[in-house]
Image: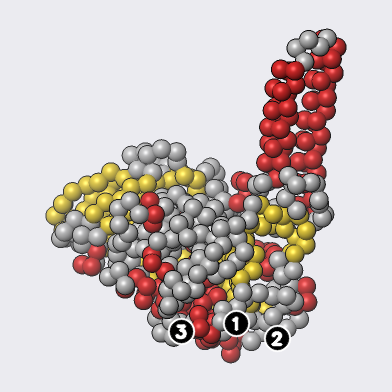
């Protein structure tokens, strides 16, 4: 059963649910304003009556634009197909996706509970030449406390009218995740680093695989129905990235489909650093299924941002045999299959993953899945991604520092809980504070001997001192924070 969360990331999709729809009125208003300037230059000799008539006409146009915005927003909820001219994003029912509206080069979906999510749509099934590196499974890292740490959760799902094969498929699904983690581990090793996905596990350390019978029959299944059914079953945890294996092939199903956040800021408060996120693999197993699963989780973690040097402009990249690259038809798509001859997780390390980027490079200054701020991957410490609640009184937590972390980077970020605050950390809604605030002290010790204390604000990072065996973190009243020890 899922770890229920009463509320979700306050900086996530719900806050911007109108997206490009709201820009329709802005476009109309800008056009009206520009026309007004031209008209006023040409009609200075006109009578006051004419001026009053023009102003009335403008008010009518503004009112019509406002009505149009409301109509389109209502249609997203009601499921109506709209064609409102070139300025309006088309909204329609889409194969294997469900009802969605265009938001730039992405699709915005309003779910049954009113929350909206973004996706670029379906991803194709990879060819045999693209999956050669997904042959070495490696067990991912296990989180210690799912209620306090960002984690991946694997879910086996099937349609309401198909057979539940959980007992026979559990090992197969776990193998897909292990193969994806093997690829992550191999990519990090090229930079002299060790990284693993941080996953929910059973008590014996094996991968936890939840099983859910969805409420929708196979013939009616889409990405939207899968997410709706899972949310209705309680899978709404703001600390979870859901790795979903759908057992079956619904009509028009692609290889996989995943949610995505447009945010390239290199900071712990990046919206890609929260959940819930949903990535569906549509029935594919083996090396191909592992690549699909890693690809969809890559979207869930924030790859590929449209500011990346080799972006396709639609959530992917253009560099050869790359987990996140293919010719997707995006506005900047110029796919070149010769750039990397073997499968990579970020060919050339310049678009979305690099655990040790050069100063001034794109991944050193933008959201980067290999950066210490990414709480979804495990570096040198199993304390990575620890969520600490400091409400209602000052709170402390002690974090062990393994030898491998000495001289490496740590990162911390401070948050303020949004009232009302529950005593259960899994039931707290967090929002990022604006500006750096001195809310967290991190004091380093060699056994019982103090080394130094660092002040951590909204987002901060530094170097773990040599000889440190533990860090004691103290939070001010009413503040929460995460603390990450990274292999970077």
Position of the C terminus, as image quadrant, is bottom left
**Tag shown at residue 129:** none
Q: Position of residue 27 (x, y in %)?
A: 69, 37
What residue is rendered at 31% in x and 73% in y?
189
Q: Is 180 displayed left or right of 400 in the figure?
A: right
Tell me whether circle 1 and circle 2 mark residues in contact (CB < 8 Å). no
Q: Position of residue 272 (x, y in %)?
A: 50, 56
Q: Is 390 displayed left or right of 251 in the figure?
A: left
* Label 1 CA crowd tier, 10 Å (few <14, some 14–19, many 20+): many
Query: Which of label 1 and label 2 is nearer to you?
Result: 1
Q: Is 186 displayed left or right of 77 in the figure?
A: left
Among the two numbered marks 3 and 2 on one chain, the one whose residue lies closer to the N terminus: 3
* Tag 3 residue: 132
Snapshot quadrant of residue 60:
top right
What residue is rendered at 83% in x and 24% in y?
57
Q: Is 465 displayed left or right of 265 in the figure?
A: left
Among the two numbered marks 1 and 2 on one chain, the one whose residue lies closer to the N terminus: 2
Distance Cα–Cα, label 1 vs label 2: 17 Å
Query: Which of label 3 and label 1 is nearer to you?
Result: 3
**Tag shown at residue 163:** 2
Which is more toward the observer, 55 or 474?
55
What residue is rendered at 62% in x and 64% in y?
329
Toward the bottom, the furthest residue is 168
* Tag 1 residue: 284
Q: Position of residue 22 (x, y in %)?
A: 69, 41
Which is more toward the observer, 284 or 149?
284
What residue is rendered at 38% in x and 65% in y?
349
Q: Secondary structure at mark 3?
A: loop
Q: Secondary structure at mark 1?
A: loop
Q: Secondary structure at mark 2?
A: loop
Q: Position of residue 85 (x, y in %)?
A: 79, 46
Q: Is residue 241 above or below residue 288?
A: above
């Amino acid at each position: 059963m899922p770890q229920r969360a009463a509320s979700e990331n306050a900086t996530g999709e719900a806050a911007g649910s109108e997206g490009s729809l709201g820009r329709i009125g802005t476009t109309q208003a800008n056009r009206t304003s520009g026309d007004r300037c031209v008209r006023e230059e040409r009609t200075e000799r006109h009578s006051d009556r004419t001026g009053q008539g023009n102003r009335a006409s403008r008010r009518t146009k503004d009112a019509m634009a406002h009505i149009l915005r409301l109509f389109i927003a209502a249609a997203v909820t009601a499921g109506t197909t709209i064609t409102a001219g070139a300025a309006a994003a088309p909204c329609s029912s889409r194969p294997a996706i469900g009802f969605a509206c265009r938001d730039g080069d992405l699709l915005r979906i309003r779910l049954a509970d009113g929350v909206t999510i973004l996706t670029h749509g379906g991803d194709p099934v990879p060819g045999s030449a693209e999956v050669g590196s997904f042959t070495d499974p490696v067990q991912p890292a296990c989180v210690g406390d799912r209620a306090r740490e960002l984690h991946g959760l694997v879910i086996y799902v099937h349609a309401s009218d198909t057979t539940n094969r959980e007992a026979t498929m559990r090992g197969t699904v776990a193998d897909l995740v292990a193969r994806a983690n093997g690829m992550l581990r191999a990519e990090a090793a090229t930079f002299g680093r060790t990284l693993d996905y941080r996953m929910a596990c059973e008590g014996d350390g094996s991968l936890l695989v939840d099983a859910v019978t969805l409420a929708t029959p196979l013939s009616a299944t889409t990405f939207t129905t899968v997410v709706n059914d899972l949310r209705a079953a309680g899978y709404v945890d703001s600390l979870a990235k859901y790795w979903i294996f759908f057992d079956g092939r619904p009509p028009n199903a692609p290889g996989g489909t995943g949610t995505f956040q447009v945010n390239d800021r290199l900071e712990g408060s990046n919206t890609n650093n929260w959940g819930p996120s949903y990535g569906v693999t549509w029935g594919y197993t083996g090396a191909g299924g592992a690549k699909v699963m890693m690809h969809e989780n890559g979207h869930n973690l924030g790859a590929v941002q449209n500011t990346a040097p080799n972006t396709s402009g639609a959530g992917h990249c253009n560099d050869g045999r790359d987990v996140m690259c293919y010719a997707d038809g995006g506005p900047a798509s110029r796919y070149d299959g010769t750039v990397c001859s073997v499968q990579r997780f970020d060919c050339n390390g310049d678009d979305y993953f690099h655990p040790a980027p050069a100063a001034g490079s794109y991944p050193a200054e933008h959201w980067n899945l290999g950066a210490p701020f990414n709480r979804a991957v495990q570096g040198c410490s199993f304390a990575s991604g620890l969520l600490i609640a400091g409400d209602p009184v000052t709170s402390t937590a002690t974090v062990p520092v393994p030898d491998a972390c000495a001289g490496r980077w740590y990162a911390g970020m401070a948050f303020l809980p949004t009232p009302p605050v529950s005593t259960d950390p899994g039931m707290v809604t967090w929002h990022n504070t604006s500006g750096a605030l001195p809310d967290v002290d991190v004091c380093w010790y060699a056994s019982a001997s103090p080394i130094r204390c660092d002040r951590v604000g909204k987002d901060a990072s530094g170097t773990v001192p040599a000889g440190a065996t533990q860090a004691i973190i103290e939070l001010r009243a009413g503040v929460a924070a995460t603390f990450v020890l990274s292999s970077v």
